[in-house]
Amino acid sequence: MGSVRRVLPDLPPTKPRLGVALGLAPSDDDRAHNAAAARLSEVAALWPVVVGVLVLAAAGLIGALALWHEPTALATTLGAALSVLGLACWGLLALPAASQLPPHLRIGALAILAALLGVTLSLLMGLSPGLPSGSLRVTGFVLGFGAIVLTAIALHAVRAASLAFAATLAAMVPITAGFGLAAAAAALLAVALAVGVCRVALRDHELLASRGEEEQAQRLAARLVQEYESHGTGWFWQTDRAGNVSYLTDKVARELAALGTPAIGERLVNIFRVDSTLVDTERTLTFHLSSRTSFSDYSVRPAFETKADRWWSISGRPMLDDLGRFQGFIGSGSDLTERRRADAEINRLALFDSLTGLANRQRMRLALDQTLAPAQGPRTTTGLFLLDLDRFKTVNDTLGHQIGDELLKQVAQRVQRAVGDAGLVGRLGGDEFQVVLPSEGNRESLGSLAQEIIAALSQPYFIKGSSIAIGCSIGIAIAPEHGDDSETLIRNADLALYAAKADGRGMYRFYRDEMLEGAQNRKRLEDDLRQALGSDQFHLAYQAVVSTGDARIVGYEALLRWVHPTRGAISPADFVPIAEECGLIDAIGEWVMRTACAEAARWPENVRVAVNVSPIQFANPALPAVVTSAIASSGISAARLELEITEGVFLNEDASSDQMFKALKGIGVRLALDDFGTGYSSLGYLKKAPFDKIKIDQSFVRGAIESGNRNAAIIKAIVTLADTLGMETTAEGVEQQDEIGLIRDLGCSHIQGFVYGRPARAEDVLAQLITDGGRITAVGHRVSRANRSKMLRSARIEMGDEAGEVRIRNISATGAMIDGVEFPDEAIGVDVQIELLENQLFPATIRWAADGRAGLEFAQNFNLERLNQPTSKLTRKAG
């Protein structure tokens, strides 16, 4: 943009000098200089006529005198002088050389010549009374007077010359006519004329200054308007009385012409139309133009067909003349195109996910609210899917976030293809997606679509040379069955998603009321858990770890127990995951660490204590300080403390994990790898992590003594590996006495389980260690039998064409005990079908029946693990 000069404040006007006003003195004002030159040019335009009249007047007088034989010498001299003066004035006014002189010098010279002309004309008119006849005298007077009048008219523009000419004429009256009334009248008229000319000259000079200021203001305004129109986004327009455009800023006019409509001369309403999509624009341009009312900031678009997306904002008001008559409209406008595009982009960013292009959380919420609005009808059903990717975090951690982002894009495309036009797909953030399915409440259709999405997302992905496999879990809620507002529906779909993940991932679950009850129960547990530490509701129970060589106790594992004041004993499987989720596990873990060390300080020096450490505790940099403080406070040696760590700590294996292992080993504590073989087993971390012991999970111990079972071979392989690495081994979950010999024969160095009794309080442990010098006697069943699981659940049973409900009391791989139905004696040996899993019947035979109970033998062994939902490795030790 061009520079803008600083405008100084106007100074109060000063009264001009008379010489400057008359043009006889030089002026620093260019306007006065130009005005004087213009007046001289005006006189120059008329002066050739004046010269002709002067010559004619002189020639006529000389001719009349000569015709009557009167003396012509004076007349000839005066005529010649008159011609010379007229030509001199003409040269002064018209010659280029003279025009180079300053105007005040030319005006002064013209004033002198005008005075000489006055003298010459006065003397020449004085000869007219000497003509012989009255008609000639009148003719001579007319010619002389006419020359005077024409000369005065010609000199009128140059005030100084006009004044000099008039003053000379008045001064010549007493010379030509003598002193008397005529001379007095001439003098009076000369004074009056001088006063009038001077006043007019001064007024002209003042008007010139005022007009100059106005012109300067107009030029500045024009410059500013031109600058604004050329470089700004604004522009101006004007119409005539009929509403036709009479003025339009050039850049807008050119743009409209390029779009196909010349603007000048066209009706304004044929060029622009109000954008009807904006609710704040209530009236049309036609209304305002016809009613002659003002309008402001109307958003308009082209009123003609065009492919260009253009928007403007215009304002206008009616124009009235001095008499109040309507003259048309005048107004301004500005370009809204970029702002509208920016607003559209902002709106897109506000409602769409920048990574995948799907709807974002805000838009999904708006869509769901609109779908559930009462206006849609009270019977309208809506399905809501919440999707969460399985194993996505592993992709981010191992391959990087760029690969993760590309994976999310492909996931979005697959979900979009699977859903199609049936609903709206959105990304809530991270690896969470949502699908809103209006007018869809059929469970079979929703389940089929959910399974299709799971199958589509489970197909391999190929990104930058890497083959990636992930899964998907889906929670489903249906409105209004599961909620008639978005908040309730989303909450229930989230609970269903939580259940789908708990059931093993890669599946979908519909919301059920018991899910909300479970969530509410977890919330109550969380609230109670926050008070448990301060209320002394926790205590530790210790389970013996026994050497297989001499059946002596070498240590105890500290197991956390919670006795609720109203609910009673609560299983760690119920409250430990909640403690991890709500951030209490660090505080609880520290309490366990300090309490275990303090109570172990009363035991013999050769007995160790083992404490479980969750992955959350392990990731806390303060763990070494907590361990050191617990050891120092209790006074036990560091070697008597054994930290049991699960394989979960290796999911986010990085440099911090290595540093934590080094820090813990630097303290001198022992490290045990807990639940080995059940989760993310990898031989890679065994060669890096400094473990002193491997604990073989109870799932390998159970059934190991049965013929044909592979668990014994697995245990042997683990023991061999541990021996090679110089590590001890502990077999967990040993319950039968005949399993002790098997475990010993397989090479395990230690045994832990109910075979040596239930976990005991610290006082009982101390008494146990004093008795028999730490030796312990097995108390479990002498001979192993099929593993049984106690339970109380309803099941459907079918016998021939009859069906009914029974309760399963306990179950093993070979059979189950049921109650709730009276079987006659003749029913023994009859084949039945019993529902062990939901909607799955298994064949069995009734082997005994008495007192409302019966024993069933399965047609083939049943895998009890199918009854157990996967639980966190941190909560498997429930007792």
Image (tube, rainbow, N blue to C red):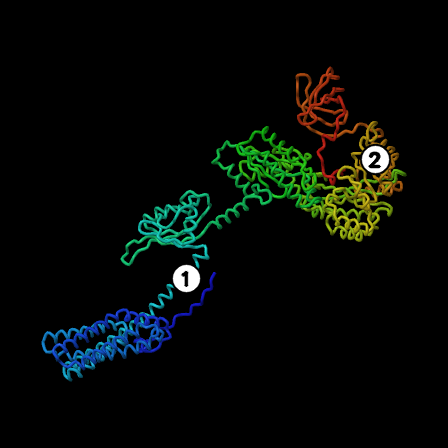
x, y percent for residue 378: 49, 33
Query: At numbered mark 1, what does the secondary structure look like: helix, strand or loop?
Result: helix
Q: In front: 588, or 251?
A: 251
x, y percent for residue 174: 17, 83
Task: Determine whether, in the image, residue 340 is placed left or right of residue 239.
Answer: right
x, y percent for residue 682: 78, 40
Which quarter of the rendering shows the C terminus? Answer: top right
Task: Determine whether, in the image, residue 571 is placed left or right of residue 30.
Answer: right
The reply to whether residue 134 is in sight is: yes
Q: Nearer the viewer, mark 1 or mark 2?
A: 1
Q: In front: 589, or 189?
A: 189
Cα distance between the residues tagged 1 and 2: 96 Å
Up-down relation of residue 414 to residue 856 (above or below)? below
Query: At numbered mark 2, what does the secondary structure look like: helix, strand or loop?
Result: helix
- The residue most toward the right is 550
* Mark 2: few/some/many CA within 10 Å (<14, 14-19, 20+): many
Task: Determine whether, in the image, residue 17 is placed left or right of residue 447.
Answer: left
Give the residue drawn at x 48%, y 35%.
376
Up-down relation of residue 596 to residue 82 (above or below)? above
The reply to whether residue 564 is in sight is: no
Residue hosting label 1? 223
* Mark 1: few/some/many CA within 10 Å (<14, 14-19, 20+): some
Q: In front: 284, or 155?
A: 155
Amino acid at pointer 1: Arg
Looking at the rendered structure, which numbered label has been put on residue 44? none
Amino acid at pointer 2: Ile
Residue 56 occupies quadrant: bottom left
Looking at the rendered structure, which numbered label has been put on residue 715? 2
- Mark nearer the N terminus (1 vs 2): 1
x, y percent for residue 566: 67, 40
